[in-house]
Amino acid sequence: MKQLITLSALSLLALIGSPAGAQSMDKPMAPSAASAYPVAPAPGLYDALGGQTGLRTLMNDFVNRLKADARLAEAFKDANGANLAKQLTDQICQLAGGPCVYNGPDMKEAHSNMDVTRADFNALVEVLQMSMDARGIPFARQNQLLALLAPMHRDVINVR
Ligand code: HEM
């Protein structure tokens, strides 16, 4: 049930954008990858995710789970896990309001040489929720991160 609520909240946010988006009017985000998704992070989100150290631990766990997940293992079997965890850490740190800069490819480019479906995207979100549950990140904070990731579906999903 919790999963269903989160996924429908995610779809809704993808359609209408987060109410926090209004803040980006008076608080412009730094240029770079994050500016493609100009939704302001909820205050305190970066710290609630454990800062840089907590995020790196979370992303290491997330990548391990992606490689073990029956739905996604094939897609991630050749992925360089350490590099992916580092890139995700930088990206989410920056998106969540932390002091990092993501220097990797934009989301369209990063996923252009693979077929990604909506089912893949939803499965990845579920796996991320499992990782956040395992780290004891509160449900409300989980949804604040998912709200930042939701707009990426347009660039990541390339098989309709
Ligand atoms: C919000 C959702 C997603 C985000 C934020 C995300 C983020 C990223 C990032 C930052 C990279 C590293 C790019 C680089 O440095 O080259 C990456 C690579 C990758 N992503 Fe995603 N991704 C998402 C969804 C997905 C989905 C749904 C799939 C499912 C197939 C996927 C599969 C991959 C693969 C296979 C790689 C390459 C890893 C490697 O070869 O090292 N991603 N993604």
Image (cartoon, grey):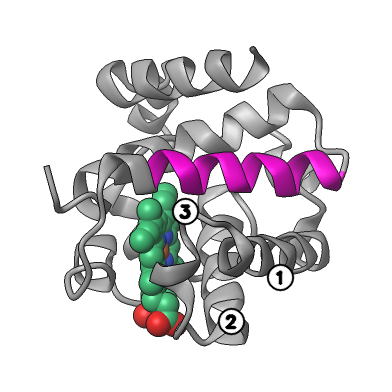
**Mark found first going from the N terminus, 3 or 1:** 1
Closer to the observer: label 3 or label 2?
Answer: 3
Of helix, strand and loop, which one carries label 1? helix
Which residue was labeled with disc 3?
A: 71
- How many numbered discs sit on the rendered protein? 3
Q: Is residue 158 left or right of residue 15?
A: left
Which residue was labeled with disc 1?
A: 60
Q: Residue at 79% of width from left, 38% of height from top?
A: 133
Q: Is residue 54 left or right of residue 89?
A: right
Q: Residue at 57% of width from left, 39% of height from top?
A: 126
* Residue nearest the viewer, comparing 75 with 98: 75
* Residue nearest the viewer, comparing 12 with 101: 12
Circle on res. 81: 2
Q: Can you say whether 101 is above or below 51 in the image?
A: below
Q: Are marks 3 and 2 in contact (CB under 8 Å)?
A: no
Q: CA distance from mark 2 to mark 1?
A: 8 Å
Magenta span covers which residues?
121-135
**Mark found first going from the N terminus, 3 or 2:** 3
Amino acid type, callout 1: Asn
**Image-quadrant location for residue 32:** bottom left
Under 8 Å from ligand 1: the CB of mark 2? yes
* Residue nearest the viewer, comparing 136 with 95: 136
The quadrant of the picture occupied by the C terminus is top left
**Mark found first going from the N terminus, 2 or 1:** 1
Amino acid type, callout 2: Gly
Does 129 appear in magenta? yes
Q: CA distance from mark 3 to mark 1?
A: 19 Å
Question: What percent of the width, then of the height, locates residue 137?
Answer: 81, 37
